[in-house]
Image (cartoon, grey):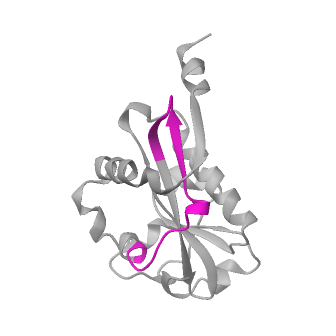
Amino acid sequence: MSSQLLLKHNLVYLTEDASHDDVIELINAEAFGPGRHTRAAARIREQGAHDRSLSFVCTDDGETIASVRMTPVLAGGVKGHLLGPLAVRPSHKNRGIGRELVRIAVEAAKRKGSEAVILVGDPPYYMPLGFEKVAYGALQFPGPVDPGRVLVVPIAADVHARLKGVIGWRE
């Protein structure tokens, strides 16, 4: 059996809880650096709490090594969730962990009745995971954002037509 299979066998995906907060902060700092709080998506997350029931971690032998969070948003006329940050420790990159966290989070959002999952991210990474480009400039973020990196997994009908206007946190 290869070491990759042995390592994968130790990976466990869990719903995030408050005990994960400190290590998630560490993982995000490691992945995105000190400028992460000034980004437009981070400004939305500062408006209100993320949804722990749709946020997940991955552990390897009990050590938290990756995280994804989902924040409820109103994006134009769409009640959806903003995915991110998504981060994996450098020691565990390129093993499909981030992709699996995205898959789990999107499926959980669908089950909870979310109309869409939105993110600001790298199209070559996220489009194979079911994300589509949002119309250029359709959503106004609370800060600068590259419109070519605004992506969505439409879940409800007519999502693209209703993704027009301001995006912000919702209860």
Residue 112 located left or right of residue 1: right
Residue 114 in view here: yes
Q: Which residues are magenta?
A: 44-66
The residue lying furthest to the front in this view is: 19
- Residue 62, given in percent of the width and then of the height, sits at 49, 33
The residue sitting at 64% across, 51% down in the picture is: 103
Question: Disc count in the image?
Answer: 0
- Residue 108, given in percent of the width and then of the height, sits at 68, 59
- Residue 152, given in percent of the width and then of the height, sits at 59, 68
The residue sitting at 65% across, 72% down in the picture is: 116
Residue 54 in magenta? yes
Above or below for 34 versus 31: below
Towards the viewer: 137 or 65 = 65
Q: Quadrant of the C terminus?
A: bottom right
Towards the viewer: 61 or 70 = 61
The residue sitting at 50% across, 60% down in the picture is: 69
Residue 86 in view here: no
The residue lying furthest to the left in this view is: 34
Above or below for 163 versus 126: below
Residue 99 located left or right of residue 122: right
Q: Quadrant of residue 7?
A: top right
Towards the viewer: 26 or 95 = 26
Q: Quadrant of the N terminus?
A: top right
Residue 98 in magenta? no
- Residue 120, given in percent of the width and then of the height, sits at 46, 66
Above or below for 18 versus 92: below
The residue sitting at 41% across, 55% down in the picture is: 21
